[in-house]
Amino acid sequence: MQQGVFSLLLEKAFREVAAEHGQQYAQGAAHSWAEVGASYLGFALCGLPSTELRRVQYITKEQYGPIILNCKWYDSLKAVCLEGNKSVQVLLPGPDGTLCLCPVTEDLFLEMLDFCREG
């Protein structure tokens, strides 16, 4: 999904990988957690304010509880989202509702997953 909206790709990956491990997200939860992940990357790469990142994170955790994600699933998620590449160009949320085209590397992707798990 080169140059696609990252949150949509991540949502699909969260659902697929969880299902492969016998887990299922509640309606809207995978989408909301994917928005948290995209917001983290938007904060790291596009200037999304930390207040917006924390707002998205707080609302998601309050509404859906902790993310369904095991660190043993990271390689599967990385394979889906990075399509076997070292990085991928995706659209991430920036300040004032803008979308920014940015490269997401393997290391930053894994850092984002850790942020979601710790969130």
Image (cartoon, rainbow, N blue to C red):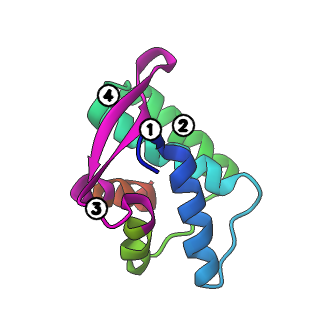
Q: Are marks 2 and 1 in contact (CB under 8 Å)?
A: yes
Q: Tell whether position 82 is magenta.
A: yes
Query: Sequence-wise, which precedes: disc 1 or disc 4?
Result: 1
| Gap between marks 3 and 2 measured at Cα | 28 Å
Residue topped by disc 4: 46
Q: Name the residue under label 3.
A: 85
Residue drawn where x is 74% and y is 62% of the image? 26
Q: Which mark is residue 39?
A: 1
Nearer the viewer's eye, disc 3 or disc 4?
3
Q: Where is residue 83 in the image (x, y as percent from the top left)?
A: 38, 63
> Three-letter amino acid code at disc 3?
Asn
> Is residue 67 visible to us here?
no
**From the viewer's perspective, is residue 79 above or below residue 42?**
below
Label whose residue precedes the other's in the sequence (3 or 4): 4
Camera-nearest label, 4 or 2: 4
Q: Mark 2 points at which residue?
A: 56
Q: What percent of the width, then of the height, locates residue 4?
A: 48, 41
Q: How far apart are marks 1 and 4 (CA)?
A: 9 Å
Q: How crowded is mark 2: few (under 14 residues within 10 Å), some or many (20 or more)?
A: some
